[in-house]
Image: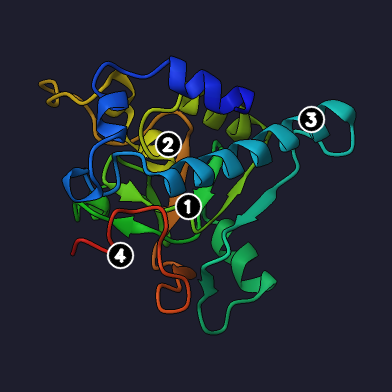
Amino acid sequence: MCPTWRRWASSQRTEAMPRYYLPDEMKLFGTDLTDGGIGCALSHMMIWKDIIRQCAAGTASSESVFLVVEDDCEFAEGFSEEMLLDRLSHVPSDWELVYLGGQDLMHKQHLYPAGQGVRRLYKGFRETTAYVVNEAGAKACLEVCVPMYWQVDTHLNDESTREGLRAPRRGEQEFTMRPRGYCLHPPVVAQNRASFPTDVQKVEHDA
């Protein structure tokens, strides 16, 4: 058992560990962990740790930008480095994590504009198909995802679930403060579900 998995297993929220053992048909889509979800989370964690190591060793710096792409990522027609840099130029300078695509599950992201073609992250945003991250973002991502008791994109975007499953508190904000994140809209990537069936979710999609 690897150290990260051991720490996850020994640090579960009271309700999270029993839910991990539920049959797939009883699990909450996008929240409860599956074996594939654990593997996905560990892959991202190893990348974040490598970013931090590179910056500490001087092979990268706090100003470096890292592009993380999952194997099921499909780039939009006309995607290019020039187009991506233009889109990223509209992201606020305090960014730590910027998603290139994803799902607005609660259909509220339009309430959080942050610039031309840019929206703030909030609790209803999901997917880690492709994103850019810097050193501060890698540290923040590790901080909020260890211990891990829900799926990685839930940990990154829904701050309330880091305290366990609970009802929203009165006046609680929906947008995410840590990591300080944004997403591009319209997106420049999408999941290629036809060629890469999910092994992370309990079903291909609940919609």
Q: Could you tell which of marks 1 and 2 lies nearer the N-terminus?
A: 1
Instruction: Report the Cα–Cα distance between label 1 and label 4.
Output: 16 Å
Q: Is residue 92 visible?
A: no
Residue 61 at x, y percent in the picture? 80, 35
Residue 69 relative to residue 173: left or right: right
**Contact, mark 1 vs mark 2 (Cβ under 8 Å):** yes
Q: Which mark is residue 128?
A: 1
Q: Could you tell which of marks 4 and 2 lies nearer the N-terminus?
A: 2
> Of the residues tagged 4 and 2, which is closer to the observer?
4
Residue 201 relative to residue 206: left or right: right
Instruction: Report the Cα–Cα distance between label 1 and label 2.
Output: 9 Å
Label total for image: 4
Residue 134 at x, y percent in the picture? 66, 39
Extreme bottom residue here? 77
Residue 57 at x, y percent in the picture? 88, 29
Instruction: Count neighbours of disc 2 (C-alpha within 10 A) and say few if under 14, some if 14 to 19, many if 20 or more.
Output: many
Q: Is residue 44 visible?
A: yes
Mark 1 residue element: loop
Instruction: Report the Cα–Cα distance between label 1 and label 3.
Output: 22 Å
Q: Amino acid at mark 3?
A: Arg
Residue at 44% over, 69% down: 190
Q: Which residue is mark 2?
A: 156
Closer to the camera in the image, 76 or 120: 76
Q: Amino acid at mark 2?
A: Leu
Q: Which mark is residue 53?
A: 3
Quadrant into which the C terminus falls = bottom left
When the figure is inspected, residue 55 is found, relative to residue 199, above or below; the finding is above
Mark 3 residue element: helix
Q: Could you tell which of marks 3 and 2 lies nearer the N-terminus?
A: 3
When the figure is inspected, residue 83 is found, relative to residue 51, above or below; the finding is below
Q: Could you tell which of marks 1 and 3 lies nearer the N-terminus?
A: 3
Q: Amino acid at mark 1?
A: Thr
